[in-house]
Amino acid sequence: MPTDRFRALDELRAFVVFLVVALHAALTYMVYAPEWWYVLDPQRSLIYTRFVLLVDVPIMLIMFFLAGYFALPSLERKGAATFLKDKAIRIGGPWVFGVLVLAPPTAWMIYYSRGAPLSLFAFWTGDFWGVAYQQSVYWFLGVLLALFLATALVWRLTAGTAIWRRRPAAPPAWVLAAFVLAMILASLATGSSVDRWSHNWVLVYQPARVPLYVGYFALGIWADRSGWFTDGGWHPKLVHWLPAMIVAGLVYDATRMILPTLAPAGLVNLATAVFFNVFCFTSLLAGIAVFSLRRSHGPVSQSLARTAYGIYYLHPLILYPLALIAVAWPVSIHVKMPAITLIAWLVSWALSAGVLTRVPGLRRMF
C-alpha cells in the first residue's frame, strides 16, 4: 500500500483529534451547554453553540471509519490471536486505566468547578460509581475494542472466504446513497436524540449513534477491500464533496438552531437524523479529499500523526483545569477559547511526543 495513503489518513486523524480538543474547549462557552459539562464559563456565545453542533457530527465517526479501514490489513498480517493481543495492549490497557484512574478526577471537575464540598476521594469512592458515572473521552476506546473483537471473531470464522477478498472498484453512487439512508433509518429506529448519552457500565455510548459506530467502521473495512485511496483506486473529488459538505452543514445548522421554533418535535427529529447523517458522510469524504491533496509530509505533520492517540488520551487532564483557571481571566471568551484549545493541544502533544511514545512500556501502547 502506498505510503502517501497512510500519511494522508493519519494526518486526517491528527486533524480530527485537534477538532476534538477544540470541541471540548468550546463546550465551556456555548449557549445551551450540557448542565453536567466539566467547566462552564459565565460568558457564553452562540458562535460556540454552532461550532459544537457542527464539529460534533463527524469527528468520532471519521475515527471509527479510519479504524475500520486499517483493521483488515492488520488482521491479515498478524492473524487473529496476535491482532487481539495487540489491541488488548494498545486499546484495552489504556481504556481500563482511563476509566478507573483518569475518568474519576476528570468527572470530579463537575463538582469542583461548582464549589461542591466533596473531596476527590469521596467522589471517587461514591458518586462516581452512581449518579456521576462516565468514562470521559475513554468511552471511544471501549467501543472500538468491542468492534475489533467482533471483527477478529468474524474474520477467524470466515477467513479465506470471498467476503474478505479485495475487489478494487469505485463505489456506485447508489451504494453511497444507500449507506447514508441506512444510517438515517438505523439512528431513527433507536428512538433516541443524537445528543443523549447512556451506558451499561462497561460501555458508554450515544444510543442514536451506535448504528453509526458500526456502520462507519464497516464502511472503512469495505473501503479497504475496494481499494479506495490507492494508486488507481477511487478517490473522492474535493470539487464534489467540499461544496456538498458546506451545504449539508448549513442545512444541519438551520435544522438545529431554527427549525425547533417553527415545526413540531417529530419533524425536527426526522430532519435532524437526515441532515446529521448527510453532513457526517459528506464531511468524511471531503476530509479525505483535502488530505489526499497533500504531497509534502514534513516532520511536524509526521509527529502530529504519530502522537494523535496520546493527544486524544491526555487532553482532558489539561484542558478542563485550564478552562477553570480561564474563568477568572479578564478577557473575551473569543480569546479564552482559542487560547485554552491551543495550550491544551500543545501540552498534550509535547507529553505524547516526549513521554507516551518514548517511555518503554508506554510506547508499546501509544
Image (cartoon, grey):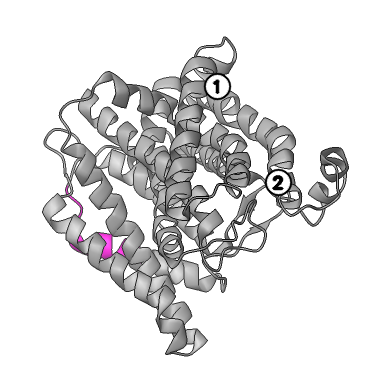
Can you name the residue that lies furthest to the top here?
360
Question: At which x and y percent is residue 309?
Answer: 48, 31
Q: Is residue 177 magenta?
A: yes
Which residue matches tag 1? 365
Residue 294 visible here: yes
Give the residue type at disc 1. Met
Tell me the magenta residue range. Answer: 170-180
User: Any mark on residue 109, and which?
Assistant: 2
Majority SS type along the magenta span: helix
Earlier-in-chain disc, 1 versus 2: 2
Judge the density around disc 1: few (<14), some (14-19), many (≥20) Cα neighbours within 10 Å. Answer: some
Q: Name which quarter of the figure residue 84 lies in.
A: top right
Q: Are marks 1 and 2 in contact (CB under 8 Å)?
A: no
- Per the model, the C-alpha gap separating discs 1 and 2 is 27 Å
Residue at 49% x, 31% y: name it: 311
Q: Is residue 30 magenta?
A: no
User: Any mark on residue 123, and which?
Assistant: none
339 w.r.t. 271: above or below: above
Give the residue type at disc 2. Met
Question: At which x and y percent is residue 328?
Answer: 61, 48
Judge the density around disc 2: few (<14), some (14-19), many (≥20) Cα neighbours within 10 Å. Answer: many
Say which of 141 and 290 sits in front. Answer: 290
Q: Name which quarter of the figure residue 28 lies in.
A: bottom right
Which image quarter is the N terminus in?
top left
Residue 69 visible here: no
Residue at 57% x, 9% y: name it: 360
Is label 1 or label 2 in front? 2
Mark 2 secondary-structure assignment? helix
Question: At which x and y percent is residue 220?
Answer: 35, 44
Residue at 30% x, 39% y: name it: 224
Q: How many marks?
A: 2
Q: Name which quarter of the figure residue 241 lies in.
A: bottom left
